[in-house]
Amino acid sequence: MSSSAQHHPDAPTTPGIPRAATVLLLRPGTDSPAPEVFTITRHTALAFSAGVSAFPGGRIDAADALPADFWAGTDLVDWGLRLQLEPDTAGMVLAGVVRETFEETGVLLARHRDGRPVDAATLAALPDDARRRVEDHELDFATLLAEHGLHPDAGGLRALSRWVTPEGEPRRYDTYFFLAALPDGQEPGTLSFEGADSRWTTATAALEDFRAGIHQLMPPTWAQFRALAGAPDLDSALATGGTLEPVQPTVASRKPRRIIDFPGHEDFAVDLAAALAAGSSAASGPSA
C-alpha cells in the first residue's frame, strides 16, 4: 500500500442502511478440482429471504467493534481501502463475518495468538453452548475469543463484492461478500435456527439447480456463484477478483413482469425464466 493512499469515506451508499457480511466457505471439490461452496437453505418461516439458498452471514453488530489487540498483525488501514471504509469500521465488518459464520455453522475463522489455526481440538475446548450463547447475545464474541487466546483470521478472508438492497424493499442491507477456505480440521456443524438444510455444491451445479427449479437464488447469491463458476480449483477461486464498488439494483414494474437492473441482470432473467418454467417458486426479489 502506498504511503500516500487515502482511505475511503466511512458511509454506506445510502446513510442509515445497516451493514451486513457473508462468506462463501470453499473446499476442494469431491468429484473434480472445481471448488465447492457451503450453502444454506433458509427456513421458510423467516421474515427475510425465506426459503432461499444463501451463504452464512448476517448483520454487523455494535459488539463487533473488537479491541485493538485483536487485530495485531492485521492491517486495518489496508482493509479499509479494500472495503472503502474507515479502518475501525472495516474491522467491525471482518469481526462480524467471523462471528456470523461461527454462529450459523460452528466454523471458526480464527487463529491462536501464536498464529496457529483453530482446529478440531480448539473447537472441542470451547463450551458446548458457546455458539448458542453468542447468537443469543448472552456471551460476547470478543470475550469468547479472549478466553481462549484467539483472534479473527482476517488473513484467510478475501473480499469479493458488495451489494446494497434496492430502494423500496422492506429490509435493506449494505452487504459485503467474502471468500474463505474451510480451515483444516473443521467442518460445518448443526445449523442455527435460520438454516433448514445445507449442502456443498460447485458454483456451476448451483446455477444449474437454480435453472432447473431445484433451489431458489436471490440475485446477489446468483451473482457470487456466477463469479466463481469459471474457477478450476480452490486457489483460483480464492484469487477471484471482485469490485467493492457497491452494486445497488434498481427495480421497475414493466408489464407483464418485474425488471431488476444490475450487472448481469439479462442472464439472471434468462435463468429465472427457466426456473419458473420448471415449476420453481424461485425468488425474483433483489434483496441482498
Image (cartoon, rainbow, N blue to C red):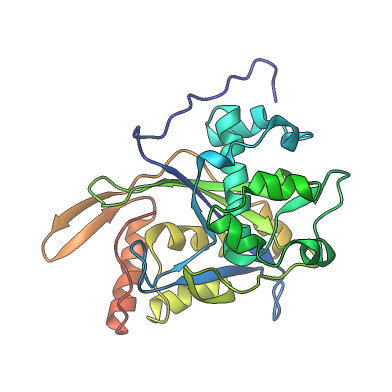
Looking at this rendering, what residue extends furthest in the front direction?
138
Quadrant location of the N terminus in the rendered image: top right
Name the one closer to the observer, 258 or 155.
155
Q: Is residue 51 left or right of residue 131?
A: left
Q: Is residue 203 above or below residue 161?
A: below
- The reply to whether residue 232 is in sight is no
Residue 148 pos. (x, y %): 79, 51
Residue 146 image position (x, y, % from top left): 75, 44
Q: Which residue is drawn at 61% across and 66% down?
A: 105
Q: In this view, does 207 lie above or below 113?
A: below
**Residue sitting at x 55%, y 33%:** 89
Rendered-image quadrant of the C terminus: bottom left
Question: Dividing the picture into quarters, in which one does residue 27 lie?
Answer: bottom right
- 225 to the left or right of 13: right
Relative placement, left or right, of 105 versus 42 is: right
Q: Relative to 1, is 205 above or below?
A: below
Where residue 219 appears, as percent x and y from the top left, is: 38, 60
Q: Which residue is drawn at 80% across and 64% down?
A: 184
Who is closer to the viewer here, 252 or 196?
196
Name the image quarter holding residue 113. Answer: top right
* Residue 177 can be seen in this image: yes
